[in-house]
Amino acid sequence: MLHQIKGLHHVTSLASGAAQNNDFFTGTLGLRRVKKTVNFDAPDVYHLYYGDETGAPGSVMTYFPFPGAMRGRAGAGEVATTAFAVPRGSLPAWTERLSGHGVTGLQRGTRFGDDVLAFSGPDGDGFALVETEDARMPWTGNGVSEDIAIRGFHSAAIRLRGTGPSAELLRFMGYEEIERDGDVTRFAIADGNGADIIDLESVPGAPWAGQGAGSVHHIAFAVETRARQLEVREALLDTGYQVTPVIDRDYFWSVYFRTPGGVLFEIATNEPGFDRDEDTAHLGEALKLPSQHAHLRERLEHVLEPIGD
Ligand code: ZN
């Protein structure tokens, strides 16, 4: 069993519009945009990152907004819900805030004994706020007060036709099964960064998910260093997973592999972080391009949709 993984690093999804996406995560949810860059594999499309003050691993929701992209179709073989941690007692205020911003799909409930508010993102993205104890410092720069502000990810829920092989993979990655609630099995990692929980939801016979706007593209797990990442990569290769070579994503180093349930997993390093090319005080303000696309700046500044500060 591995011991290098420290919880979630980031979750990356698809969107249909950059400005709408930016307004939702900064204006409605109150997260900080910590990086404005492009998809390194398709530089005509933004890669937008939202999180806490520094974009700490375990807080970072990222998006590829493809203008006018068709919506995805919910189903099996995907991350169905991305959940954020909020303080106890804050859900009434969040319900009011989200309905005031026209957010749809609001639904209060209880999961594993915690109060939960489910809601939809601008493209039908499956989100939830979970009331919990969480010592992480929130970003409060966008007008959401500290007593309700998002602390980072609480968990991600993966929906699968059969959970056995993915449960086995999570155990190998260092997760432990801690609880069951109906069709959902909860796994947690010890000594994590706060974003410590993965839920596996069994939906036998459900149609396969179709990826599109509002769908999660991949989910990334945190390792502290490049050395730890190489250890994890070797161990996954030894277990029979097809893992990519290490790829430089400028703000972290990545390897990717497809899991038995069809979900794309990434292992991402905590180093070097989002302040490698911008001061913490100004994270996310300027359009940052990786060196391989720097020569495209003039064209990209023209074709990329303008977004708010
Ligand atoms: Zn990623």
Image (cartoon, helix red, strand yellow):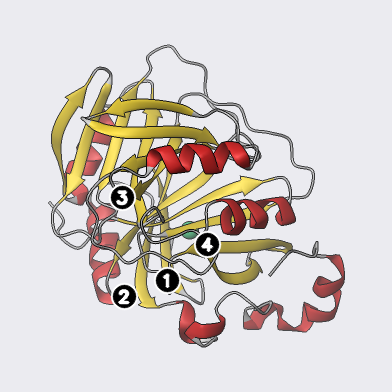
Q: Secondary structure at mark 2?
A: helix
The answer to whether any part of residue 259 appears in the image is: no
Q: Secondary structure at mark 3?
A: loop
Task: For marks 2 and 3, give the one nearer the viewer.
Answer: 3
Classify mark 1 as within 8 Å of ligand 1 or not, answering yes or no.
no
Left or right? Give the position of 151 relative to 29. left
Marker disc for residue 226 = 2
Q: What amino acid type should be assigned to the residue bearing mark 3?
A: Pro
Q: Secondary structure at mark 1?
A: strand
Left or right? Give the position of 243 relative to 247. left
Q: Do the numbered discs 1 and 4 sit on residues whose CB atoms are within 8 Å?
A: no
Circle 3 sits on which residue?
87
Q: Earlier in the sequence, mark 4 or mark 2?
A: 4
Q: Do the numbered discs 2 and 3 sit on residues whose CB atoms are within 8 Å?
A: no
For the point 31% across and 42% down, the residue is: 89
Task: For marks 4 and 2, give the one nearer the viewer.
Answer: 4
